[in-house]
Image: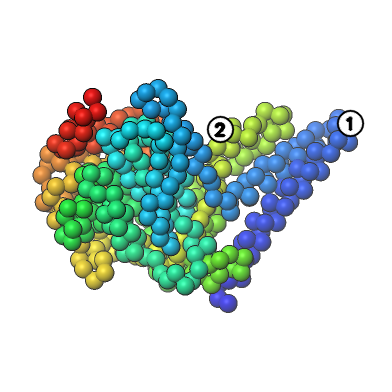
Amino acid sequence: MKNMATYDLMESIRNTNQWLGASAHALGSYPFAGIIANPFFQVLSAWGEVTERSFARMVAKPDWNIYTVVGEDGRDHVVNVVPVVERPFGDLIHFSVQGRGPMKRKVMLVAPMSGHYATLLRSTVASLLPDADVYVTDWHNARDIPVSAGKFDIEDYTLYLVDFMKALGSDVNVIAICQPAPLALAATAYLAEEDPEAQPRTLTLIGGPIDPDAAATDVTDFGRRITMGQLEQLAIQRVGFKYAGVGRMVYPGLLQLASFMSMNADRHGQAFYEQILRAAKGEAADHDKHNRFYDEYLAVMDMTAEFYLSTVERIFKNLEIAQNRFEVAGKTVDIGKITSVAVKTVEGSKDDISAPGQCVAALDLLTGLPDSKKANHLEDGAGHYGIFAGKSWRNNIRPLVLEFIDSNAGEDANVTRLAQV
C-alpha cells in the first residue's frame, strides 16, 4: 500500500536501534567487564543505555507527573487528571486539585499539535496550578486513531476549540501556545458571531504564526520554497500495521523529529556525547537535566495528513488568518468581530520558530477591539521554548499573563475574590 512500507521501515529502524542500545548496555554491564582495565566496556554500556532510552522515548507518550500542588492553606493537595470533553482526536482535560476551594482564575491551555504531546507544557501547567484552575487540550496521536474516525484538519481543530470553550464557559482565560495561536484567534472570532456569550474572557497568544510573512524564519522559508505536491510526496506516509490507525495518512512524528534535530544538529550531537561520558563515569541520573529534556523532546506523535497539509497551505502559504479570510464550515470568520475579549500577545526576541512580529500581528486584525483591551510583550533574550516553559516564562511572562487575566476579570470575578476573603 502506498507509503506504508516507508512508515514501517522507519519504525523498523527505530526498533532496531532501541534493540542495539539494549544489547550494548547488557553486554557492557556483565560482571566480567570489571576485570578489564580498558574503559571500552563502560563506554559501550553507557552508549547502549543512552541509545536505548532515546529510541524508546520516540514511541512513548510521557506522563504528566504532576501529583500534588501546594494550596493557599500551605498543604499539599493531590492532583488528578480528569477528562472533561472526550473526542476522537483530542480531549479537554482538567487538573483537578482535591480539597482546594474555587479559584478566581480558570485557564485553558491550548497545546500545540506540531509533533509533540501536550505534556510539552508540563512545566507551564505546574507553574499555573498554584494560582489557577487549569485545563489543557490533550491531542491524540494520529497513528492510534482508526480510519473510521474520519478526517481532522485545521477547521476541525478550530471547531474542537469552539466546543472546549463552550464547555468551560465565558469566565475562561485561553492561553494558546505556538502553532494553535492563529486557530485559537479564529475560534474566538467564530464564537463572536455564532455564540457571543461563550467567548472567553481573555485570550493570550504566545509565539504563534498569526502572520508568518511578518518575519522570516527557516520555517517560513521552507513553506515558501516547497510546493504542496512536493510536500505531500516527501512528508506524508500511511500508518503501518503495528498501530490502530493502520492505513491513515499522516505526517509521521519521526519525520518531524528529524527536522527538529537537524535545525540544531551540532548542539544535540554534543549533548548526547556528553551524556554518554557522564553515564560511563556513573554521573548520569534517571531524571538529570539531559533526560528530563530529551524524554519529552524525543517523544513525538503523528499528525493527520489533512491537518499538516492544510496548516502549511492555509496558514503559511495562503495567509488566510493574516489576511482575515479564514473559513470554517463554509463561513468566513471575521476577526474584527471580536469586540469584548481582551487579547495579549507574547513574543521572544530570539525566537527562531515564530520570530518577533508574527504573533503581534494579531492586534492589527482586531479592528473591533478597543486599544485598552490589547496588550503585547516582547521578552528580550528569550527563545521559542523559553517564552512558555523556560526561565523567561517563570520569571517574567507568567506574572504578566496572570496580571493581564486579573486586570480583565470583570465585576463577577471581583465579587468572587471578595467572597473568598
Residue 331: numbered disc:
none
Farthest bottom residue?
1
User: Please, what is the three-letter code of the amino acid marked with disc 2?
Assistant: Lys
Whole-percent x, y for residue 327 in the image: 24, 66
Location of residue 8 with respect to 346 vertically, above or below: below
Q: Earlier in the sequence, mark 1 or mark 2?
A: 1
Answer with the quarter of the image where residue 191 lies.
Answer: bottom left
Residue at point 39%, 33% (across, down): 99
Rendered image coloring scheme: rainbow
Whole-percent x, y for residue 103 in the image: 30, 35
Whole-percent x, y for residue 413 in the image: 19, 36
Residue at point 30%, 58% (across, down): 163
The quadrant in which the C terminus is found is: top left
> Does the rendering let one see residue 353?
no
Residue 289: numbered disc:
2
User: Is 190 on the left-hand or right-hand side of 74?
Assistant: left
Q: Which residue is mark 1?
A: 35
Estimate the spatial distance between the alpha carbons at disc 1 and disc 2, rounded to whole Å: 32 Å
User: Is 173 on the left-hand or right-hand side of 7?
Assistant: left
Residue at point 42%, 27% (across, down): 70
